[in-house]
Image (cartoon, helix red, strand yellow):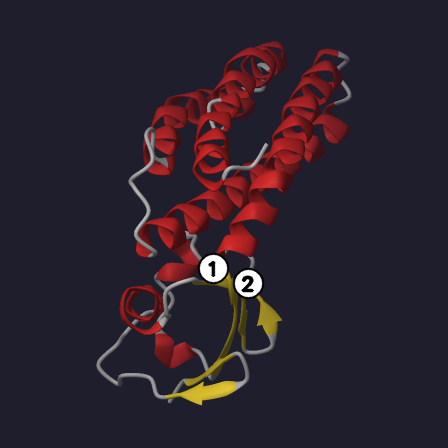
Amino acid sequence: MTQLEINGINFPVDPAMQTWRELIEDLENNRIGKGKAISSVHIDGTEVQGFREESALTRPLNTIDEIKIELVDMSQLVADAVKDCDSFLLSLQTAMVDAADTFRQQQLDQANQKLTEIYQSIKMLVSLLKGLEISFQNQGGSVLQPSVDQLVNEMGPTLEGLIDAQSSQDWILVADILEFELAAAVSNYEQVVQSFKKTLGIV
């Protein structure tokens, strides 16, 4: 049976729960007090940064021996994360332009490695913002417009086009999508960051 530890204290896990999704939803909706948010999750000794990603959410609990969760004050977590998001977004957009230039120079091994890192960075950004959005709403905050899910859906066709261009080895098209379409789609996440800033009074 899965062992659950939150801030060093052991808690029982409902044996009826089947997946990590069910457990985290129960924790955030019913068991984590107001003003608190999840800052980290370790599963069987390994930190899982993308613990809100679908691949993690669908993981059966019967494949997990131990879960350790750290909670922090939500207002501090959100404030720190929102401040970091501005620089992260700028770095991500700069990386896209750099990768596009590398594709145009036909330095394909290096360019494809950069593209892989960009995919990973986008997943991390979405996971971070989604986590903040859920925590914020669970503490009584208003629903953000646009929501993170809306922006993810809007980005979908651009990512599909990028993957298709990469599969067909049309490197000029890959570069153009990266620099002009994907960078613009990622910039839309600034709206979410600004909404958090406005609500929290962060300058």
Depicted 100 relative to depicted 198: above or below: above
Considering every residue shown, the one lying at the far left of the view is 16
Q: Residue at x 64, y 41 (%)?
A: 84
Circles 1 and 2 in contact, beta carbons < 8 Å: yes
Q: Secondary structure at mark 1?
A: loop
Could you say which disc has been placed on residue 184 in the image? Answer: none
187 displayed left or right of 61:
right
Q: Position of residue 149 (x, y in %)?
A: 34, 37
Q: Residue at x 39, y 54 (%)?
A: 135
| Residue 72 visible (yes or no) | yes
Q: Secondary structure at mark 2?
A: loop
The amino acid on which the numbered mark 1 sits, given as a three-letter code, is: Phe
Q: Position of residue 144 (x, y in %)?
A: 33, 36
The amino acid on which the numbered mark 2 sits, given as a three-letter code, is: Val
When asked about the image quadrant of residue 100, the answer is top right
Residue labelled with disc 1 = 51
When asked about the image quadrant of residue 113, the answer is top right
Depicted 49 relative to depicted 59: above or below: above
How far apart, in angstroms, are the residues tagged by discs 1 and 2?
Answer: 5 Å
When asked about the image quadrant of residue 119, the answer is top right
Q: Residue at x 44, y 51 (%)?
A: 131
Depicted 156 relative to depicted 54: above or below: above
Residue labelled with disc 2 = 48
96 displayed left or right of 18:
right
Give the quadrant of the C terminus.
top right
Q: Nearer the viewer, residue 86 or 76?
A: 76
Q: Residue at x 63, y 23 (%)?
A: 93
Q: Position of residue 112 (x, y in %)?
A: 67, 30
